[in-house]
Image (cartoon, rainbow, N blue to C red):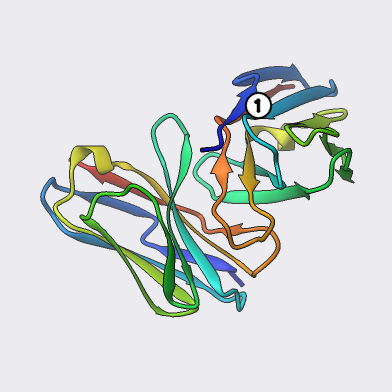
C-alpha cells in the first residue's frame, strides 16, 4: 500500500496552461506539504497544511494555489504555467512529531 | 533563515569502501533529518537526530549530530551499489509538522 501517492507522475504541458497535481496520504497524518525540487536538485518548501488549514506559505507566486478538501488530500493547482515552473514537485505528510513521508514526485515539464 | 551546506557535492566510491557526508548548518539544529533519494523516486527517510552528541545507526549507515548541534555527519561502512543516490540533510523545528529546510545534497556513486 502506497503511503503518500501523487498523480500524475509526469506532466508535460504548454506555457500558459492551467494544471493540477493531486496528493493523497493514507497514514492518518494531520499535516501535509508541497516541496519543489529544481533542476539542480535543490528541494524547497512551498506550502504546508495542518488539518486542512494553511500554516506555511513560502514566497510562491499567486499562480500556485494549494487546496485541501480533507486531511488526507492536498492538491496543487498552477495557473498560467511558465517555463520556470518546470521541476519535480513532491508532496509529503507527517504527524505532529516525527519524520515527513514523501510521495514519489511529479515531474512537470513546461514547453 | 537557516541554511544547510553539504559536502562533498558529489562522491564516487569503490564498492566496499567507507565514506562520510557532512551537513553544516548556519543555525542551531533542533531536528536534523537525513533522507536518501534515488533517481526518479521520492525521498526515503533514514534517520532523525535531535540531541547534541546523538548518534544513530541503521544497518551500515551511522548518523551523528555534534555537541553544538550545528553539524551532522552520515557515515556508510562497506558501501554497496544499493547505497547509490542523492543524500539530503534537512533541518526541522522541535515539532514534526514544521517545514524542512534541505541541504544542497550529495550525489553518491558506487563503482563496482
User: How many numbered discs, if any?
Assistant: 1
Give whichever of B43, B109 is nearer the camera: B43
Give whichever of B112, A81 is nearer the camera: A81
Residue at 54% across, 69% down:
A31
Vertical comparison of A110 with B13: above or below: below
Residue at 87% across, 28% down:
B78
- The reply, left or right, for residue B8 in relation to residue A32 is right
Quadrant where the C terminus of chain A is found in the figure: top left
- The residue that label 1 is drawn on is B108
What is the chain letter for disc 1?
Answer: B
Element under label 1?
A: strand
Residue at 25% across, 49% down:
A61
- The reply, left or right, for residue A65 in relation to residue A99 is left
Residue A56 at what x, y percent from top left? Answer: 44, 59
- The reply, left or right, for residue B85 in relation to residue B13 is left
Which residue sits furthest bottom? A70
Residue at 39% across, 32% down:
A39
Question: 10 Å neighbourhood of mark 1: few (<14), some, or many (≥20)?
Answer: many
Residue A83 at what x, y percent from top left? Answer: 20, 38
- The reply, left or right, for residue B71 in relation to residue B26 is right
Kindly indicate the quadrant of the structure image that contains residue A7: bottom left
Amino acid at each position: 500500500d502506497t503511503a503518500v501517492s501523487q498523480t500524475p507522475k509526469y506532466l508535460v504541458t504548454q506555457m500558459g496552461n492551467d494544471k493540477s497535481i493531486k496528493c493523497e496520504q493514507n497514514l492518518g497524518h494531520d499535516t501535509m506539504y508541497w516541496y519543489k525540487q529544481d533542476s539542480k536538485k535543490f528541494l524547497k518548501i512551498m506550502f504546508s497544511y495542518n488539518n486542512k488549514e494553511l500554516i506555511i506559505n513560502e514566497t510562491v507566486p499567486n499562480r500556485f494555489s494549494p487546496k485541501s478538501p480533507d486531511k488526507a488530500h492536498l492538491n496543487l493547482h498552477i495557473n498560467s504555467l511558465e517555463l520556470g515552473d518546470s521541476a519535480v514537485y513532491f508532496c509529503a505528510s507527517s504527524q505532529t512529531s516525527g519524520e515527513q513521508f514523501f510521495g514519489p514526485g511529479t515531474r512537470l515539464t513546461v514547453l | 533563515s537557516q541554511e544547510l551546506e553539504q559536502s562533498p557535492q558529489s562522491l564516487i566510491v569503490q564498492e566496499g569502501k567507507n565514506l562520510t557526508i557532512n551537513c553544516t548548518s548556519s543555525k542551531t539544529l533542533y531536528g536534523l533529518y537525513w533522507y536518501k533519494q534515488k533517481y526518479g523516486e521520492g525521498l526515503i527517510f533514514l534517520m532523525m537526530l535531535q540531541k547534541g552528541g546523538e548518534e544513530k545507526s541503521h544497518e551500515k549507515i551511522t548518523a551523528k549530530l555534534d555537541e553544538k548541534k550545528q553539524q551532522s555527519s552520515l557515515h556508510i561502512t562497506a558501501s554497496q551499489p544499493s547505497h547509490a543516490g542523492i543524500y539530503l540533510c534537512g533541518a526541522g523545528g522541535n515539532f514534526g509538522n514544521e517545514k524542512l529546510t534541505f541541504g544542497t545534497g550529495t550525489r553518491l556513486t558506487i563503482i563496482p
